[in-house]
Image: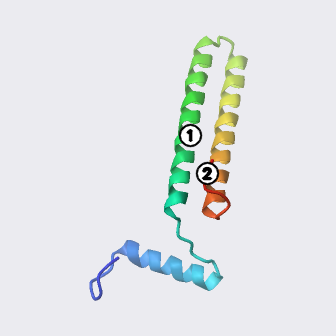
Amino acid sequence: MAQDGAPKSAYELAMERLRKRDEEAGIASRTVTDAQKAAIAEIRNFYEAKLAEAQVLHESNRRKATDPSTLDTIEHEYRRERERLTSERDRKIEKIRSGGETAK
């Protein structure tokens, strides 16, 4: 943040407005502990690897497919798997942020 008396950046002003709006709405600000940060980083790394694995399998399956309907099925399954993994990752991160747990 800017020092006392120093002009504030547009980012700092916007963040102040958002914090004030949250306070008025009754939304409490929580800080994330070091243990929570580590757990979140572990979860992100795990799901990044899972998403990369899914992409590699998807590319392999696409190369093998010859029929357009099979290609459509492969694309659909890949999108569903990405959505599932992303949703699962986000749900676990939110649980950690809310204080639910600190590990995968």
In percent of width and height, residue 48 lies at 54, 39
Q: Which element is circle 2 on?
A: loop
Q: How many marks?
A: 2
- Determine which residue is flagged by label 1: 46
Give the number of the mark in front: 2 or 1: 2
Q: Residue at x 52, y 76 (%)?
A: 18
Observer-nearest of 28 and 13: 28
In percent of width and height, residue 102 lies at 61, 56
Q: Is residue 29 above or below residue 44?
A: below
Q: Answer few, some or many: residues within 10 Å of disc 2's Cα (few below 14, many 20 plus, some between 14 and 19).
A: some
Q: Answer few, some or many: residues within 10 Å of disc 1's Cα (few below 14, many 20 plus, some between 14 and 19).
A: few
What's the amino acid at mark 2? Ala
In percent of width and height, residue 66 lies at 65, 11
In this view, the residue farthest toward the bottom is 5
Q: Quadrant of the N terminus?
A: bottom left
What's the amino acid at mark 1? Phe
- Determine which residue is flagged by label 2: 103
Q: Is residue 25 left or right of residue 37?
A: right
Q: Residue at x 60, y 62 (%)?
A: 97
Cα–Cα span, label 2 and label 1: 12 Å
In percent of width and height, residue 64 lies at 61, 12
Q: Residue at x 57, y 81 (%)?
A: 21
Observer-nearest of 73 and 96: 96
Q: Is residue 1 above or below residue 80?
A: below
Q: Which element is circle 1 on?
A: helix
**Which dot marks residue 104?**
none
Which image quarter: residue 100? bottom right
Q: Residue at x 56, y 21 (%)?
A: 59
Observer-nearest of 89 and 14: 89
Q: Earlier in the sequence, mark 2 or mark 1?
A: 1
Q: Is residue 32 left or right of residue 12?
A: right
